Amino acid sequence: MRSTRTTVVTAGLAVATLLAAGCSGADQTSTGGETADAASLTLSATTPAAKGGLTEANWLLEDEPDSLDLDTQGTSAGRVVLTNVCERLYQLQPDMSVKPLLAEKAATPDDRTLVLTLRDGVTFHDGTTMTADDVLYSLKRHADPDMEQSDEFGNVKAMTKSGDREITVTFKQPDALFTKALAGDAGLVWNKKQVEKSGEDFGTPGQPDACSGPYELASWSSGDSIIIHSYDDYWGKKALTDKVVFRWASDSALVNAVTTGAADGAYTESPNTASALRGKKGIDQYYGPSTASLVLIPTERGGLKNEAVRQALSLAIDRAGIAKSGYGGLVQPWATPVGAGAWGYEKPAFEAAQKEITNAPGSPSADDLTRAKKLVDESGVNKAEPIVIGTDASQGRTVVANATRSALQRIGLKGQIKTVPTAQFEQFYSDPQIRSEIDVLVGDWYISKSDPMGFYDNGLSDSSNNWVGFKDATYDTQVKKALGTLDDAERAELAIEVQRRFTDAAVWISVAQVPSVLVLGDKLTGPPASMAYLYYPWAAELGTKSADSAAGTGTTDGTGTGKG
């Protein structure tokens, strides 16, 4: 999928301490409970390479996967497990670039044709050889309208087997992001025989995997654990860790498991409760590039359908205050709706463009507020009509909602907070009728591609995520042109122009970028720290800092990690 809502700001999903090893991008912060400064954190794509292997690792997820069939249930928890078990035609690297993987090489004889030469000698976990038929079957399954990744194939004209180890994809028009999609779930290669054998039960507890990765699925005991083992006949480099046991926890259970050593590590989705483990000994935390962001998403119901009012609100929000009060300083005030992890190419150009945006200050100055008040006065909006802010009761969203209300008050408008249960909050994203009760949503978002153009289609006139009804013919033209521009430098220029139009109109109001966070016991190292962990076999690189150690440090009884 090109754009994905995530649960990055859900309070109660406790993350680990800010205490971290002072090397290779790990940041060491005060053990006295002081708030971190996200702007000064060093974001590193990787952690130091492991020197020793692990017999077993115990890993925490923040929820049990709904399914291990990512075509039908594309959850983060499922990806964290399956990225070690299943492989894709391309692979997202820790630095957020992409390269061919099961497609050994790719050729573009013209700008509407992609020819993939498949890697030889790849076997699935049942011992059968991966064939072009498996690849073609997988691509067509992903493209099925009922599947999660179908939107990635909207520009595909045909997919054919053009040789024993060759697949040819032709497009209706050039598609710059398709190979990036193949590094995500649209590029998963399934064992056709196994998927068909499992039928409707594929991806459920008790069923084998249908993949070729460095690990194979050993067991899934619903409500208890998922276990993966290294695959002896893997075509690539053997995994350092022999066995990984996944359990799931939230709130104090996760904190307890990491603190006591019952869990060896976790990738955390929320920075909200980082202070819960601050100062604890024996825990390292690493921060990596991510595409995730905190945003305000306006609707067309009330005052924020007026562009000038949206611009005024963006000028008046205290982003630095939100970062400090709501997220322990781990999020960074940000001017665009995608994090820096999206800069998978032409990074200096995107970095410079980010700094040139003037309508999203970290902390509003007196001049910013004067300008904002003038915009409101000139807009003709009804100042007596409150702007309703949709949120749930989580710590981070509550802070953002209160800061938004304060910003509205500073510029002569009224704000009213509508707090709903988390389950109902989730429906704001998908149900226009429920969304009609609010004027702006305290939201969060990430994209699965390391390319900002994977986000900006949300501003197209016909996008289902363009809630405010933004219409700009030039914007639509530029987005479509950028999506069809294969040259990175040219596409970056177009993307920056699209970004300028989006942020100038404050279609969404950016608040902060959220780093990827990796928590590890302090004897372990190796996995990537970036958001690539959702698509890269991170467990295969997990090991010990010392070559003398070769055993897991956690327990296998799940103490403190069960959801119950």
Image: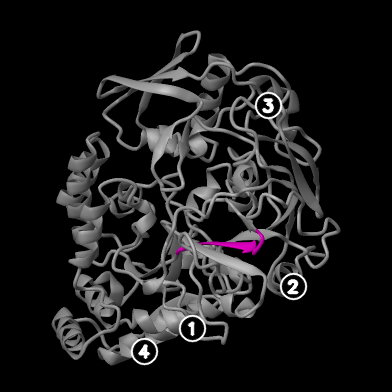
Question: Which is in the foreground here, disc 3 or disc 2?
Answer: 2
Q: Nearer the viewer, residue 307 or 208?
A: 208
Which residue corresponds to mark 4?
406
**Residue 47 sits above or below residue 388 on the image:** above
Q: Are marks 3 and 2 in contact (CB under 8 Å)?
A: no
Check disc 2 and report the residue beneath it: 256
Q: Quadrant of residue 563?
A: bottom right
| Residue at the spot of label 3 | 195
- Secondary structure under the numbered disc 1 in the rendered image: loop
Q: Tell whether 514 sits left or right of 342.
A: right
For marks 1 and 3, give the CA distance.
49 Å
Identified at 62% across, 40% down, the residue is: 84
Choose the circle earlier in sequence order: 4 or 1.
1
| Residue appearing at x 25%, y 47% in the figure | 346
Name the amino acid, label 4.
Answer: Ser
User: Which mark, by number, is residue 503?
Assistant: none
Please state, as top left, top right, bottom left or bottom right, where the N terminus lies in the image: top left
Looking at the image, is 421 positioned above or below residue 120?
below
